[in-house]
């Protein structure tokens, strides 16, 4: 096979590394924030025993889920802008998985907004299941996806062009190796744990107690799966001592979350799973430098790297200035939102539908 | 069908569908902000009711805009990977900036607005809807800069070693003459649509209510009357602005994309002065004219600003392309990539003429129709006049938002189809820009599934809109900041 070697783009390595880190930061923001609203979304039909309880669950994430999702859009946009070849290869290569992500995002997005707009039980049940299935689907696909980034998706250039594509193409069933599937279920368990801890932190009364009890159970599953996944990761794609340190920190976060959940310390428990997600993500992104989650054919190092896949120096510089100004601003008003909606809610806070159907927004 | 043809259809279907929600999101958010501002300043309950009523319609629409918008950002990479690779250095930046500067602002502050009625002081709460509305506008700035660059690729050069376009000046990209005139045109068209929605909804209720009997009906009628006129004035003002900016746009288009102007008229031979046809029946491929109604001088004026101006026809433009291509272009990127373009090859330089010809006329015609309706409504409701309820009035009230909404669609169909055979004008042919690794089966399958999901969502969305429109103005209680932790929230999902 004739393989074209793609030259580096000429942008300085520091900028390329900086943007790789920034994209990792955006992903971490997404996984931490939307991680809990995926968990909460999945749990709506299971932890809410009646309509008011379900509404309590939905309303814990109501004001924030949409902002959380923008972290994903920004990560996608930043990948496009900073590493066009990464974006082009990844998005076209994982065509069907990303379609599933889009379907999941569509059905859960309308579900939150539309479930409240009609009082009928059938209508609301349908949207609750859409929220749940959508959240599950997106989590599962990203779990499988990240596991495959660790393994490295095999790529080669197409014909005489500078474009990379996954080989063989379409590359779909190959994603579901045992490690890929393990990644999927591990992320589902982790987000269920993270989400139920968020729910415990944001609710009071019976919903709170049920969330705590559920977190106690799913926490054990997350610890078990997480341990297997992280050990396998470090054996399959070693990143040296740092990889093992991150493994220990991730595991400590999970254990601490489970312990403090049992002690009724909702806040520390939630911070602990947040830390775990951070450490796990850092560990995964470490394996993705500089090959961006790709590999050559037959296990060779990735021919597509941060060095030959990046944008030009000018674009990276301009984007750095914009990110430097606006990321702190976004963080500030996002933090403000969470303080505005800091109060726990319970069934007593949920207004009756019938009394004021038109009061809403 | 090839994967590339299916990818074009998929882009067309998902983008036209997405754009049903965009103009209303952009403009109705601002109109709701204005209504709420009037309420905060006057304390008049009427405006709180109008804020809540149109706010609800806005949110039902916004949800669809959000979920269909995500598809757009992913689609470039999924279906058009060679395009994404080739232009990412320039095109990616506005998309990333849109997410960072606009999407966060919109979604975070909209969350605060929806759920913050009893959490934030009145004026802070008012600020949240303004920031969300400004967010939608910032979004349009970046996305139109990106699209305008595809029409007129300024501020870029060709890097042969990496075989791609690279940015030379972000300022040039953002101040692209095409972007500078497209932005006001698109924003004005959005207000034209949202004005039509406010007019249509309120005007329908006004006629249905008739002469008020009770005090409550009196209040309702007064609010609907105000909103009907407000919507009509917004529509007319925006319509005039759409017209002026569209006119300037036509002249810039004649300069940078002469083929698109020729395609708008299906003008085969160069004419001086050139006439504009209102209506033409031709052969199916648009190459032969069978019957036509023509207005002399108009095309010359639209294209050049001079009634005797020369407008180049398709035959001359094709001849020029076949001999010199873009080797003499004054855009650096087009000139530098001219050899590459010759290698890739262009088989047909002419856009799909029946589509460009009719979409151009439908865009304008539907806009004019909406303006005529608004003028008529203002005439009927002058000095306390009441419209007569009935099928004719209802039809007008439906047409007021729908005509400009579809006008928006046709405008986009015209400008995107008129750019063909290029995805980046004069640089990258569309047929060479698709994802080589993606099969026709994958594109076809997802296209069918998108269509099914979008169709089902359309039924739900329109049903909800009609339901809340019919419910009419809500009863409201003055919102206040809650301090009791166990009190029911003013608003919850």
Image (cartoon, grey):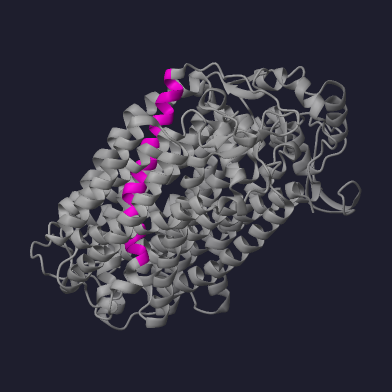
Which quadrant of the view contains residue A73? top left
User: Which residue is at a point 37% across and 38% down the rendered structure image?
Assistant: A283
Q: Which residues are magenta?
A: A14-42
Q: Is residue B386 visible?
A: no
User: Which residue is at a point 56% across and 62% down the rendered structure image?
Assistant: B402
Q: Report the label total.
A: 0
Which quadrant of the view contains residue B451? bottom right
Pinpoint residue A191: horizontal percent, then vertical percent: 34, 56
B208, B430: nearer the viewer: B430
Q: Is residue A165 visible?
A: yes
Left-right relation of B195 to B402: left
- State the quadrant of the N terminus of chain A: top right
Is residue A38 inside the magenta stretch? yes
Is residue B320 inside the magenta stretch? no
A5, B441: nearer the viewer: A5
B467, A139: nearer the viewer: A139
Q: Main secondary structure of the magenta part?
A: helix
Residue A254 vertical placement versus A351 (above, below): above
User: Which residue is at a point 39% across and 58% down the rendered structure image?
Assistant: A188
Pinpoint residue A242: horizontal percent, then vertical percent: 33, 31
B278, B356: nearer the viewer: B356
Query: Residue furthest toward the left?
Result: B484
- State the quadrant of the C terminus of chain A: bottom left
Residue A310 vertical placement versus A235 (above, below): above
Pinpoint residue B235: horizontal percent, then vertical percent: 49, 54
Pinpoint residue B423: horizontal percent, then vertical percent: 69, 37
User: Which residue is at a point 44% across and 78% down the rendered structure image?
Assistant: B208
Residue A215 vertical placement versus A255 (above, below): below
């Amino acid at each position: 096979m004739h393989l074209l070697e793609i030259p580096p783009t000429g942008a300085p390595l520091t900028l390329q590394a900086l943007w790789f880190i920034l994209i990792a930061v955006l992903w971490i923001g997404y996984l931490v924030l939307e991680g809990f609203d995926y968990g909460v979304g999945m749990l709506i039909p299971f932890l809410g025993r009646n309509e008011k309880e379900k509404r309590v669950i939905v309303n814990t994430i109501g004001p924030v889920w949409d902002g959380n999702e923008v972290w994903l859009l920004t990560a996608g946009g930043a990948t496009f802008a900073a590493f066009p070849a990464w974006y082009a290869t990844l998005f076209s290569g994982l065509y069907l998985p990303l379609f599933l992500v889009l379907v999941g995002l569509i059905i859960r997005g309308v579900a939150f907004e539309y479930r409240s707009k009609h009082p009928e039980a059938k209508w609301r049940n349908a949207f609750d299941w859409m929220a749940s299935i959508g959240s599950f689907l997106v989590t599962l696909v990203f779990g499988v996806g990240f596991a495959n980034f660790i393994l490295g998706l095999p790529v080669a250039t197409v014909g005489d062009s500078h474009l990379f594509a996954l080989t063989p193409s379409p590359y779909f069933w190959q994603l579901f190796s045992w490690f890929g599937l393990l990644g999927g279920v591990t992320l589902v368990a982790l987000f269920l744990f993270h989400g139920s801890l968020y729910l415990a932190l944001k609710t009071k009364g019976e919903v709170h107690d049920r969330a705590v009890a559920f977190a106690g159970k799913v926490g054990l599953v997350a610890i078990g799966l997480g341990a297997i996944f992280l050990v396998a990761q470090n054996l399959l794609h070693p990143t040296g001592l740092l990889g093992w340190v991150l493994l220990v920190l991730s595991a400590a976060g999970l254990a601490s979350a489970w312990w403090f959940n049992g002690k009724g310390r909702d806040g520390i428990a939630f911070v602990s799973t947040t830390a775990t997600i951070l450490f796990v993500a850092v560990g995964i992104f470490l394996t993705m430098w500089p090959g961006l989650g790709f590999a050559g054919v037959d296990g060779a190092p990735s021919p597509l790297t941060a060095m030959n896949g990046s944008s030009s120096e000018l674009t990276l510089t301009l984007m750095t200035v914009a990110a430097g100004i606006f990321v702190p601003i976004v963080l500030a008003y996002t933090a403000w939102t969470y303080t505005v909606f800091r109060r726990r809610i319970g069934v007593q806070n949920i207004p009756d539908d019938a009394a004021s159907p038109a009061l809403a927004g | 069908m090839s994967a590339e043809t299916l990818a074009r259809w998929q882009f067309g279907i998902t983008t036209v569908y997405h754009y049903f929600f965009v103009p209303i999101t952009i403009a109705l958010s601002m109109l709701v902000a204005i209504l709420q501002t009037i309420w905060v300043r006057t304390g008049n309950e009427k405006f709180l009711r109008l804020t809540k009523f149109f706010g609800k319609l806005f949110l039902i629409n916004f949800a669809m805009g959000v979920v269909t918008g995500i598809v757009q950002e992913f689609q470039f990479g999924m279906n058009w990977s060679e395009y994404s690779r080739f232009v990412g250095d320039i095109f990616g930046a506005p998309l990333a900036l849109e997410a960072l500067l606009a999407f966060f602002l919109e979604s975070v502050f909209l969350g605060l607005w929806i759920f913050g009625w009893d959490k934030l002081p009145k004026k802070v709460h008012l600020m949240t809807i303004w920031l969300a509305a400004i967010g939608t506008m910032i979004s349009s700035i970046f996305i139109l800069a990106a699209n305008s660059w595809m029409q007129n690729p300024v501020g870029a050069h060709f890097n042969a070693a990496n075989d791609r376009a690279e940015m030379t000046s972000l300022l040039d990209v953002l101040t692209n003459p095409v972007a500078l005139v497209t932005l006001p045109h698109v924003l004005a068209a959005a207000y034209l649509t949202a004005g039509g929605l406010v007019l249509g909804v309120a005007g329908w209720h006004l006629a249905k209510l008739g002469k008020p009997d009770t005090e409550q009906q009196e209040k309702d009628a007064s609010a609907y009357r105000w909103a009907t006129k407000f919507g009509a004035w917004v529509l007319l003002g925006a319509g005039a602005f759409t017209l002026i900016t569209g006119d300037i746009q036509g002249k810039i288009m004649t300069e940078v994309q002469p083929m698109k102007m020729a395609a708008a008229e299906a003008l085969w031979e160069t004419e001086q002065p050139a006439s504009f046809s209102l209506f033409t029946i031709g052969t199916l491929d648009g190459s032969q004219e069978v019957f036509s109604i023509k207005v002399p001088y108009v095309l010359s004026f639209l294209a050049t600003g001079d009634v005797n101006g020369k407008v180049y026809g398709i035959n001359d433009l094709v001849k020029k392309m076949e001999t010199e291509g873009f080797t003499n272009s004054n855009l650096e990127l087009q000139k530098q990539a001219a050899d590459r373009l010759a290698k890739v090859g262009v088989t047909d330089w002419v856009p799909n003429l029946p589509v460009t010809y009719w979409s151009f006329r439908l865009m304008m015609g539907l806009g004019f129709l909406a303006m005529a309706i608004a003028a008529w409504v203002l005439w009927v409701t002058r000095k306390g006049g009441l419209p007569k309820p009935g099928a004719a009035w209802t039809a007008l009230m439906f047409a007021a938002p729908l005509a400009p909404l579809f006008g928006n669609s046709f405008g986009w169909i015209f400008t995107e189809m008129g750019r063909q055979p290029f995805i980046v004008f004069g640089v990258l042919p569309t047929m060479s820009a698709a994802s080589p690794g993606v099969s026709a089966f994958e594109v076809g399958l997802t296209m069918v599934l998108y269509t099914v999901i979008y169709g089902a969502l359309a039924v739900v969305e329109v049903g909800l809109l009609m339901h809340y429109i019919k419910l009419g103005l809500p009863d409201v209680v003055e919102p206040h900041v809650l301090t009791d932790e166990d009190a029911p929230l003013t608003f919850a999902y």
